[in-house]
Amino acid sequence: MTDRFSLSPQAAEPRLDVARRALELLESVPGLAPRYAGRGGLRTLDDLAALPPLAKDDLNTALAHLEPRAEHGATWLFQSGGSTGAPKVGYAPTGFYMAGVHAHWQPLDRSDVFVNAWGAGRMWGAHFLVAALADLARCQVVALGSVTPDEYEDWLAFFVARKVTAIGGTPSVLRLWFARARAAGVKLPALRKVLWLGEAWQPQLDEDMAAVAPAARRWGMFGSTETWVVGTNTPDCPADTFHPLPEQLVHVGADDLLDFTTLNPDMLNPVLRYRTGDAGRLVDCPCGLPGRAMRVLGRRDSVVQVRGLGLHVGELIAQVEREPGVARAQVLITEQGGRALGVDVLLLTDQDGAVDVDRLRAELLSATFTLSTAFQHDPRSFRVRVVDALISNDRTGKTADFVVREES
Ligand SMILES: [Zn+2]
């Protein structure tokens, strides 16, 4: 079964001492001890594959007990998972393990003027992580963070004046920047690099980038606040395919679910078969880089239950976003006492986009078994509407494909 790992046994097994230490730490956590007790003897990749996978809540339980501290520099606390309530906390040392990333992936160099458009503050990690990469690249940095809707045009003029060569953000944030620039007729001829992390790439970005910054190419990172950066890609790789770093061991488990084990002795989070909820496959990347690459197939948890039926949110969104004039879509499920009262498809349209909402609604309803069956008796509870803004999570700064709202 070792072909389900990103590294060969010869490459990975001599470094499993880090995984053994993580196992000892997890065994010391009262809530997790029974699951890990007697699992010692972790020597081979087969031993590792036999360990139970670690879920986000388990890792949060472990971190609350372990409260790790960095050997050198500060220990930073970041938001780690959980969509409701108080933030759950993940830990990282200053530097955020980016030296290991920079050793294999150098999208930025000393000549770059880089706009860091990931939100800063609120215990978000990405802004600081990429700042650490810029530090290693020794480029100029514009630490912009998030802006309000009426600020885009002034900042875009500043980007032109400063001959900005690189920008980075979540694809949702980048979509706003490029859509705004395109609508305003702003060109960024000096922009060559678009760094992204935090969400899947959005194909609409390719179109807007071609219009606004024809020389710009995408450079992606894949990771989470728990694992930190797992893999990276280049403009020559498909947007959903990443090359794992040698200090990250990727495993494809049951149902194609990916899990991650750190081989980095400095990692503070005990990441041992940690599951992010993403499914994937190990593939050869067409870019030609040697070694196994990881193709991310999307989140297995993007199927939501609507009146007892599974609704494939990703498929629905993809179908809606193929519609001309639709810039981005989001599914809003309104529930009461756990039952879906209604489903809304929210549409963000292009500046000049006129979408035939009634026709789209009728097509979605007839083509989606879950919707036509669930709303057989009250079809008006399924709606498609154009909105000014999609619903973002204030805590994570991300715009998810679907949002569930409880109505009292
Ligand atoms: Zn590649």
Image (spheres, rainbow, N blue to C red):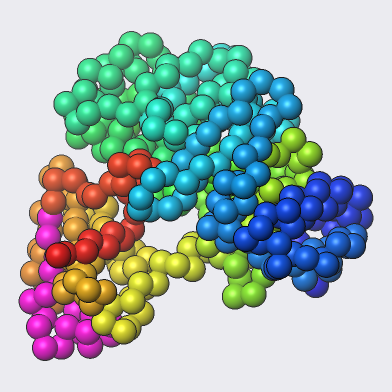
Q: Quadrant of residue 94?
A: top right
Magenta highlight range: 365-386
In the displayed structure, 249 sits above or below 312; it is above
Q: Nearer the viewer, residue 295 or 53?
A: 53
- In the image, what residue occupies the spot 16% across and 74% down? 341
- Residue 228 lies, in percent from the top left, at 60, 42
Picture mark count? 0
Residue 218 appears in view: no
Q: Nearer the viewer, residue 373 or 62?
A: 62
Describe residue 103's horizontal placement relative to residue 332 as left or right: right
Residue found 28% across the figure and 21% down from its top = 156
Residue at 36% across / 37% down in the picture?
174
The magenta stretch spans residue 369? yes
Q: Give the left or right position of residue 243, taking residue 203 as reference.
A: right
Above or below — where is 99 with respect to 7?
above
User: In the rendered structure, does residue 58 fall within the stretch colored magenta?
Assistant: no
Quadrant that contains the N terminus:
bottom right
